[in-house]
Each structure stands twice: as structure tokens, then as C-alpha cells.
Image: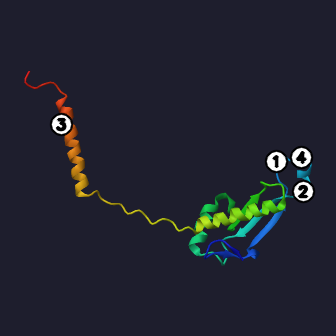
Amino acid sequence: MIQVTRGIAIAEEELSEEFIRASGPGGQNVHKVSSAVQLRFDARRSPNLPEGVRARLERLAGHRLTQEGVIVITAQRFRTRERNREDALERLLALIREAAIPPPPPRRPTKPTLGSKTRRLEGKARRAGVKQMRGKPQGE
């Protein structure tokens, strides 16, 4: 079992890895060696994910989620298979941890207090008086 958070752990059998050739520059060796990894995790059928976490995870996964509910993470940042495997697993765990954070409670709109309304109106009246004193004298 891979511990994700204190309450969530996923079985290693739920993950599948496939090694592919990395794209981009790299010389002669990059065309012969399959060092990039595609990590697949079936989030929709995972028995170890709570329903709320599963829904948030599918929303967070975005383009990495297939129509069947499988999250596909491709890692080709490093030159070795092992480093790419660790990178892909860490990225998946970070995604699940982010989904495990509960959403903030909805904001309840509040009304301004009577004191704050009074202070605002007094300030407006004071400012209006200052501006009125700038005009021409009225007796002339």
C-alpha cells in the first residue's frame, strides 16, 4: 500500500506502468531506450478513494483523465527509468493529496453594521462640507 494521506492509501496493484520512448532532443541513445514512463491509475474504480476525493480528483486531473476515468501521467523529465517512475508517482500522489483537501465552506454574505453605515455617512458629509467651502463666497 502506498500511503497518500493519513486516511487514504492506494494499493500498488491499482497502478500500471508502461515505458515509452521520450520525445525531444537527446542524441542517438534517446531513440533506442524507453526511459519515459506512463503511469496509469483508475480513479473511477479505485475502492480506496472516498467519493468526494474521487470527484475532486477527476476535476483536478483535467486533460490527464481519459473517458473511462483513468488518470494517465507521463514522466520524461529525467534520463533514467527509475527517476521518471519516482517523478510520475510523486506527481500522482500530489494530485490525490490536493484532491483530499476539503473545499472551503461557502461564503455567507453579511450586512454592514449600523456603526459602519453611520461612520461612512459621517465621513461623506464631512467631505461634502470641505468641498462646499471651496466654492465662491455666497454674499457677493
Residue situated furthest left in the rendering = 139
Callouts 1 and 3 close, C-beta under 8 Å:
no
Q: Which residue is mark 4?
A: 27
At a point 60% along the width and 76% down the height, the residue shown is 7
Separation of residues labelled 2 and 4 (CA atoms): 11 Å
State whether residue 120 is above or below residue 74. above
At a point 92% along the width and 54% down the height, the residue shown is 32
Q: Which residue is mark 3?
A: 129
Q: Position of residue 49 (x, y in %)?
A: 63, 75
Q: Secondary structure at mark 4?
A: loop
Q: Badge 4: how crowded within 10 Å, few (<14), some, or many (20+)?
A: few
Q: Badge 3: how crowded within 10 Å, few (<14), some, or many (20+)?
A: few
Whichever of labels 3 and 4 marks the residue nearer the N terminus, that label is: 4
Residue type at mark 1?
Gly
Separation of residues labelled 1 and 3 (CA atoms): 70 Å
Separation of residues labelled 2 and 1 (CA atoms): 13 Å
Residue 24 - label? 1
Q: Badge 1: how crowded within 10 Å, few (<14), some, or many (20+)?
A: few
Q: Position of residue 5 (x, y in %)?
A: 62, 72
Separation of residues labelled 3 and 4 (CA atoms): 78 Å
Separation of residues labelled 3 and 2 (CA atoms): 80 Å
Q: Which residue is mark 2?
A: 33
Q: Badge 2: how crowded within 10 Å, few (<14), some, or many (20+)?
A: some
For the residue pair 80 and 60, the one nearer the viewer reads as 80
Foreground disc of the pair 3, 2: 3
Q: Secondary structure at mark 3?
A: helix
Q: Secondary structure at mark 1?
A: loop
At a point 64% along the width and 61% down the height, the residue shown is 61
